[in-house]
Image (cartoon, coloured by chain):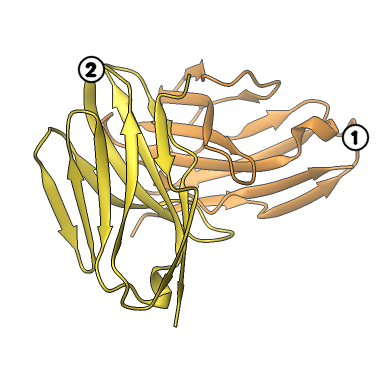
């Protein structure tokens, strides 16, 4: 069973706040990913990393930023939250590109 | 233009009523097609990977097949616990996963 953890699970916060969504995995996977998912819509890749100190933007433009200082940790930061950032954010990891990605249970973010 | 299209969007079955979900794709250099199951409030859970046309994989009541243009997820004699959203995703060339919107399956007792 995959061991990938996201915190918080739910967050309701006001506009303009700085937010960091945490993602950690204990599988030693090099590759990590952040997706955004709205109800009834497909997962959209917003950031990914192929290893420590490597980060890339995904297909969906996002105002968030990420860092990868440790293999197991891939936090996502929003410097100034806006209502348009309201969504579910899913973190995933894998060891190589054709291995299935293992997902966390997501953070449901609501910006008031 | 969507690269991955899943149909139907939603499907309601009676327990024991077999059916199939479809995932059609338009990518040219397919390297792999993935099926995931997603329960409400949870992240996607991996089911199958298919790499080439003609390949089939089975797990309990589920069987996934792949052709050059589409994949089917066959559900035989489903149970209520099979209710979930089923997601299809493809890898083209050396790019990352591209997901479809999913099929929401509800199996009634």
A110 and B66: which one is in front? B66
Residue occupied by mark 2: B29
Number of dots carrying numbers: 2
Across and down, in percent, residue B21 comes to 34, 51
The residue positioned 46% from the left and 45% from the top of the image is B102
B77 and A42: which is toward the camera: B77
Residue A104 x/y as whole percent? 49, 50
Chain B drawn colour: yellow
Is B72 situated left or right of A11 in this image? left
Residue located at (31% from left, 77% from top): B16
Horizontally, is A40 left or right of B2 in the view? right
Along the line of sight, the residue nearer the viewer: B22 or B87: B22
Q: Quadrant of the C terminus of chain B?
A: bottom left
Give how far across and how far down residue A75 sits, in percent: 59, 35
The quadrant in which residue B81 appears is bottom left
Q: Which residue is mark 1?
A: A15
For the point 33% across and 22% down, the residue is B26
* Whether residue A66 is situated above or below residue B17 in the rendered picture: above
Q: Colour of chain A?
A: orange
Which chain is indicated by disc 1? A
| Host chain of mark 2 | B
Same chain, marks 1 and 2?
Answer: no
Crowding around mark 2 (Cα neighbors within 10 Å: few <14, some 14 to 19, many 20+) is few
Residue A96 to residue B29: above or below: below
């Amino acid at each position: 069973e995959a061991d990938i953890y996201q915190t918080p699970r739910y967050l309701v916060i006001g506009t303009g706040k700085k937010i960091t969504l945490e993602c950690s995995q204990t599988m030693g996977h090099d590759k990590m990913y952040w997706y955004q998912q709205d109800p009834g819509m497909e997962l959209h890749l917003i950031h990914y990393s192929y290893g420590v100190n490597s980060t890339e933007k995904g297909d969906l433009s996002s105002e968030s930023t990420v860092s990868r200082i440790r293999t197991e940790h891939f936090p996502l930061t929003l410097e100034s939250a806006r209502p348009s950032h309201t969504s579910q954010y899913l973190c995933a990891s894998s060891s190589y590109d054709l291995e299935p990605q293992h997902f966390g249970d997501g953070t449901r973010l609501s910006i008031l | 233009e969507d690269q991955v299209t899943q149909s139907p969007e939603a499907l309601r079955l009676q327990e024991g009523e077999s059916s199939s979900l479809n995932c059609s794709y338009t990518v040219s250099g397919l390297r792999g097609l993935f099926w995931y199951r997603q329960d409400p409030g949870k992240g996607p859970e991996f089911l199958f990977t298919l790499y080439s046309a003609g390949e089939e994989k089975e797990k309990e009541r589920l069987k996934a097949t792949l052709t050059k243009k589409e994949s089917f997820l066959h559900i035989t004699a489903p149970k209520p616990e099979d209710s979930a959203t089923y997601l299809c995703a493809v890898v083209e060339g050396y790019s990352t996963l591209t997901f479809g919107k999913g099929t929401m399956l509800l199996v009634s007792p």
